[in-house]
């Protein structure tokens, strides 16, 4: 018994345009804690404590060390079968002349490491940091001060070093949301994978797809905030469901 419908398999097999949104849930099976699950990152802290500019300026050491901790976690983990399945889906769709776009809210860099290329990191990436004074990219050595409990500062201008992520109240990277919204509006199938769909404007992407006639499936052990407005909820883990979905599509098209 497959956890997803025949319709989803048939639509995905025929789709010329496929778009995907992922959230922290797709990295959970790699060992990266999510934000809002019971054992999630926010359980130790609240978003307003850490993921915004004011919190950073009020307590740079806390915020810098929280991101340093998350970088260390991410450096130790690997992409899981869910990440690899989405990279494979991109290749499958592009090889048949279709369009594919993966928009991720994640900042862990795991989709790129799994081989995804048609990728937009809506909320930036942990893998880069920069100086808030002169915007100069920060090196690993310059971030080393964090290890000793000090504030990491720019050696050129003395400004604070921050992760290249999008905090609450900050704009998404130039053009990122426009590009993702365009893909959502023109796709035949949209997959929303591992996201609680509470953070906007990213969470609006599956709804844009639905409003424009796409078949929208959510892959998540829990129902998200927007599940009732989508075509299908596939109850399961991304690392288990996505490889089986790809296999079913390959069987369907007979390749
Ligand atoms: C902005 C930083 C313009 C990096 C993050 C309407 C429109 C526009 C803005 C807003 C709006 N309403 C409110 C806002 C403001 C705000 C917002 O959305 N607030 C929310 C909380 C109400 N949005 C913003 O500020 C955005 N900026 O819009 O700019 C603007 C500016 C000023 C004023 C107005 C507009 C910026 C948002 C970006 C914030 N940065 N992260 C970092 O530190 O990581 S958000 C953070 O949450 C992460 O990026 C994360 O990806 C994102 C969403 O969380 P999820 O990924 O969904 O993770 P979560 O833990 O919640 O859920 C995991 C899911 O996985 C669960 O459902 C679980 O069941 C599932 N799961 C678990 N295991 C598995 C699994 N699924 C599959 N397989 C598994 N194995």
Image: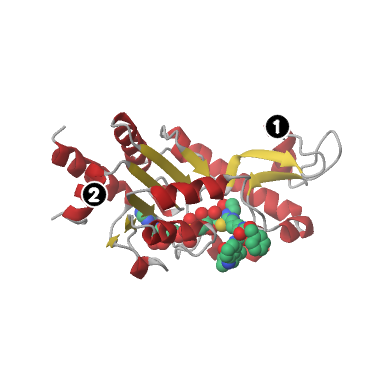
The C terminus appears in which quarter of the rendering?
Answer: top left
Disc on res. 139: 1
Indicate the position of residue 27 as horizontal and vertical percent values.
43, 48
For the point 42% across and 37% down, the residue is 78
Q: How is this picture coloured?
A: secondary structure
Q: Is residue 152 visible?
A: yes
The N terminus appears in which quarter of the rendering?
Answer: bottom left
Instruction: Give the mark count.
Output: 2
Furthest-top residue in this view:
95
Q: Secondary structure at mark 1?
A: loop
Callouts 2 and 1 close, C-beta under 8 Å: no
Which of 188/230 is in front? 188
Q: Quadrant of residue 58?
A: bottom right
Q: Is residue 1 left or right of residue 193?
A: left
For the point 54% across and 59% down, the residue is 201
Q: Is residue 118 above or below residue 5?
A: above
First in sequence: mark 2 or mark 1? 2
Indicate the position of residue 186 as horizontal and vertical percent values.
40, 48
For the point 80% across and 41% down, the residue is 153
Q: Secondary structure at mark 2?
A: helix
Indicate the position of residue 232 as horizontal and vertical percent values.
28, 61
Q: Is residue 214 left or right of residue 146?
A: left
Q: Is residue 104 visible?
A: no
Disc on res. 11: 2
């Amino acid at each position: 018994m497959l956890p997803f419908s025949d319709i989803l398999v048939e639509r995905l097999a025929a789709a010329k345009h496929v778009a995907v949104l992922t959230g922290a849930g797709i990295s959970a099976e790699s060992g990266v804690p999510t934000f809002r699950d019971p054992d999630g990152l926010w359980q130790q802290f609240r978003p307003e404590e850490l993921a915004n500019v004011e919190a950073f300026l009020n307590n740079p050491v806390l915020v810098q060390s929280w991101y340093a901790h998350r970088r260390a976690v991410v450096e130790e983990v690997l992409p899981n079968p869910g990440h690899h399945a989405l990279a494979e889906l991109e290749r499958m769709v592009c090889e048949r002349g279709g369009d594919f776009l993966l928009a991720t809210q994640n900042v862990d860099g795991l989709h790129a490491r799994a081989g995804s290329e048609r990728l937009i990191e809506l909320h930036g990436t942990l893998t880069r940091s920069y100086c808030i004074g002169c915007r100069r990219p920060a090196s690993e050595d310059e971030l080393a001060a964090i290890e000793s409990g000090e504030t990491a500062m720019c050696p050129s201008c003395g400004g604070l070093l921050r992760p290249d992520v999008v905090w609450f109240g900050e704009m998404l990277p130039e053009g990122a949301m426009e590009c993702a919204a365009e893909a959502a509006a023109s796709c035949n199938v949209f997959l929303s994978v591992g996201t609680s769909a509470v953070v906007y404007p990213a969470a609006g992407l599956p709804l844009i797809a639905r409003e424009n006639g796409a078949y929208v499936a959510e892959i998540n052990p829990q129902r998200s905030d927007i599940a009732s407005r989508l075509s299908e909820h596939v109850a399961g883990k991304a690392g288990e469901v996505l490889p089986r979905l790809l296999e079913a599509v390959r069987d369907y098209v007979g390749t």
